[in-house]
Amino acid sequence: MKSTTMCVLVVMLVGSIMGKLSPPERSYKILMLLPVSSRSHRNVFMPLAEALADRGHKIVMLTNQPKSSKHPNIEDNTHDLPYFKDENINFFENRKSPSGAFQLFETSLPTLARELYKIPLVKDLYERRKEFDVIVIDQLFNEVVYPFLHEIPFITLSTSGMEARQSSVLGNVLNPAYVPNFLEDYPRPMSLWHRLYNTFVHIGFPLYWRKWSVVPLIQKEVEVGAMHCRPAKPLPQELESWITGAGSSGVIYFSLGSVARSTTMPVQYRDLFIQAFRRLPQRVIWKYEEELEDVPDNVMISKWLPQQDVLAHNNVKVFITHGGLLSMQEAIYHATPLLALPLYGDQPRNSMFIKNSGLGDFLIWEELTVDIIVGALTKILIDPKFSRRYKENMLKMSEQLRDQPVPPTELAVFWTEYVIRHKGAPQLRSPAAQLSWVEFLMLDVIFLFHLAMIVLLFILRRIVRIITAKIFGRDRKMKKKYD
């Protein structure tokens, strides 16, 4: 039986090297599956889909989001099931659960799996899956589409960045002595406690996810960091005037992303921000999905904003964010300091990274007060001890992110076509991926080494006993003779 081969594209903060793309050998048919995704994750897929479509390839997409692409080479489909719709999720409520947002996936993923393949569109795509040259899936929480991948080359696009559970299956085991886990980050070098706890999470989370939730697969990684980031476009006139009109005080941009909607924010937190903004000299742009009463004159409310264009404006001084990886990458790309308020998943880890890297600070929802919000923003905006350092660190990391020999989207296009040309590229597979954990950790070798040492020590001990017995036995005989 032909084995399934796969490459994984990882959304990280680094790039790779490659020359100018040559024309494709032919037009490929590519199926992109992300039935469980947010709008922000879909936004990572779209640059790749459109870049491939621009090269003449035919792209078929299956998502849980409204259709967005108008490209003639992209067929954009949605399965219309209600699960994981942004408007149906309240991550503020999920924070109260001991398992956080993961409980949502545990309860909804099995139901989605039962209902997804009953949809005529999905059934048709599944029956036609071998017509496609390659299948691209969203790595996180999309194990429901693994039946599509049997005997077909495929690529996973990891919108959440490098993750130990995924990486280890590829033979690239990340060392918990210095690589943080999926949920948290720690100061470097890690303390003994952090290394111990990090090791527990590195081992425990994959076991939890595999045994109690789903069964993962995966193979081969290429980094395509900040693929969705782009240069700024001109802002609408009203927004441009608002930002420019703030003068030297500048503007604060506040958005909790596409999934954690501000309208789900508990009233006590919403009121704290309104009071805090009223005390600030800066203007505030707040992505809020409904009308909001009692808003100070220095606050603009908008249901939707061109986030990257806002972040790129030189008068936007700080970004209050939920700490999502993609928003963090956009802020770094446009060199805007951050104040993170993590809710779930990898957001606490990203927020710790922000603080530890000197890109800004983060706050905890349960500890919020008006003074804490105002104090944190003041530190980032005007405190001479911190504000200049945050901006300089952002500029430095932004330069590093942008300083790539080839755009990450072009890199992703190259490797997508490469996987197709080379029938899944099995030559890139790490030999470590074929080993059991006993073989990888060399436990059998270590066991034999210790066994050999024990046998050797036993033999030496016997030899010493024999020699000792002969020497002391001769002495005793001589003593008896003279006695």
Image (cartoon, grey):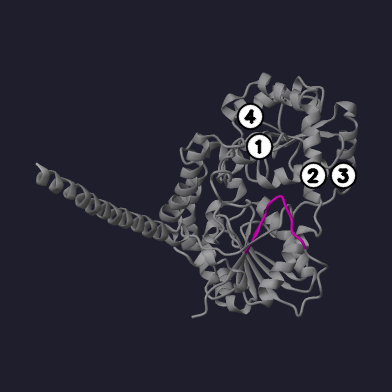
Residue 10 included in the magenta stretch of the image = yes
**Number of other residues with Cα within 10 Å of mark 2, as a class: few under 14, some 14 to 19, many 20 or more:** many
Q: Which mark is residue 235?
A: 3
Q: Which mark is residue 398?
A: 2
Work out whether mark 1 precedes mark 3 in sequence or the reverse, and give the earlier one. Answer: 3
Q: CA distance from mark 2 to mark 1?
A: 28 Å
Work out whether mark 2 precedes mark 4 in sequence or the reverse, and give the earlier one. Answer: 4
Work out whether mark 3 precedes mark 2 in sequence or the reverse, and give the earlier one. Answer: 3
Q: Say if 275 sits above or below 203 in the image.
A: above
Label 4 or label 1, whichever lies nearer to me, is 4
Label 2 or label 4, whichever lies nearer to me, is 2
**Number of other residues with Cα within 10 Å of mark 1, as a class: few under 14, some 14 to 19, many 20 or more:** many
Residue bearing mark 1: 262
- Asked if disc 2 and disc 4 are in contact, CB closer than 8 Å, the reply is no
In the image, the segment drawn in magenta is 8-17
Badge 3 amino acid: Leu
Label 2 or label 1, whichever lies nearer to me, is 2
* Residue 295 visible to an observer of this rendering: no
- Judged left or right of residue 52, residue 428 is left
Taking depth in this image into account, of 194 and 162 the one nearest to the observer is: 194
Q: Say if 133 sits above or below 67 in the image.
A: below
Examine the image and state in which quarter residue 444 appears. Answer: bottom left
- Counting every numbered tag in the picture gives 4
Badge 2 amino acid: Ser
Residue bearing mark 4: 363
Q: CA distance from mark 2 to mark 4?
A: 23 Å
Q: CA distance from mark 4 to mark 1?
A: 16 Å
Q: Position of residue 129 (x, y in %)?
A: 58, 75
Q: Position of residue 281 (x, y in %)?
A: 82, 22
Q: CA distance from mark 1 to mark 3?
A: 22 Å
